[in-house]
Image (cartoon, rainbow, N blue to C red):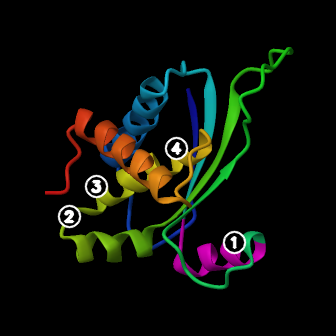
């Protein structure tokens, strides 16, 4: 498993402990869904301003959001071995995550782990546009986070 971390924000210093937990979340989602760890994920931490620009440029929604997921892998077999297959990109606004953590009464670490977990399921093809899809995705997120001991309190 290769995780390409890019920290492009100055809002908060992210320590090794949170990076280790993020890696554990990514690996647990893959295992939960029956994937091995021969994949790559790009994870960027950005400011509210940058995520708003990305949201505007790629989704035509001119507002701040907490996380954006850009899936790249469609599940098709790859004949040529170039190393890890990229599942896609996750972009998280640390400022927005911090605000949400405060609103929900839990830690920034828990919020970031939730957002990574949520995005990983998007990278694997899940969505939450319909109520049943949302219930399934939410249950999977809670299972993964519970298995890792990452709870709301």
Label drawn at residue 110: 3
The x, y position of residue 112, in whole percent, is: 38, 57
Q: CA distance from mark 3 to mark 4?
A: 15 Å
Which residue is the site of mark 1? 54
Label drawn at residue 120: 4
Q: Residues within 10 Å of mark 3 (few under 14, many from 20)?
A: many
Q: Quadrant of the N terminus?
A: top right
Give the number of the mark in front: 2 or 4.
4
Q: CA distance from mark 1 to mark 2?
A: 27 Å
Q: Which residues are magenta?
A: 46-57
Classify 116 as above or below 93. Answer: above
Main SS of the magenta segment? helix
Q: Earlier in the sequence, mark 3 or mark 4?
A: 3
Label drawn at residue 34: none
Classify 100 as above or below 115. Answer: below
Q: Residue at x 37, y 53 (%)?
A: 114
Classify 41 as above or below 57. Answer: above
Q: Is residue 130 left or right of residue 112?
A: right
Q: Earlier in the sequence, mark 1 or mark 4?
A: 1
Q: Residues within 10 Å of mark 4 (few under 14, many from 20)?
A: many
SS label for mark 4: helix
Tell me whether circle 3 and circle 2 mark residues in contact (CB < 8 Å).
yes
Which residue is the site of mark 2? 106
């Amino acid at each position: 498993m290769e995780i390409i971390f890019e920290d492009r924000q100055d809002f908060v210093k992210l320590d090794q402990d949170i990076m280790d937990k993020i890696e554990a979340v990514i690996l647990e989602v893959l295992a939960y869904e029956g994937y091995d760890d021969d994949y790559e994920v790009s994870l960027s931490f950005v400011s509210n301003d940058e995520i708003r620009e990305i949201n505007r440029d790629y989704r035509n929604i001119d507002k701040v959001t907490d996380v954006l997921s850009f899936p790249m892998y469609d599940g098709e077999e790859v004949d040529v071995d170039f190393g890890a297959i990229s599942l896609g990109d996750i972009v998280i606004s640390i400022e927005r995550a911090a605000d949400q953590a405060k609103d929900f009464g839990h830690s920034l670490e828990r919020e970031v782990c939730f957002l990574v977990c949520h995005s990983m399921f998007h990278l694997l093809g899940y969505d939450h546009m319909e109520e049943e899809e949302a219930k399934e995705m939410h249950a999977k997120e809670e299972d993964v986070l519970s298995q890792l001991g990452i709870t709301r309190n």
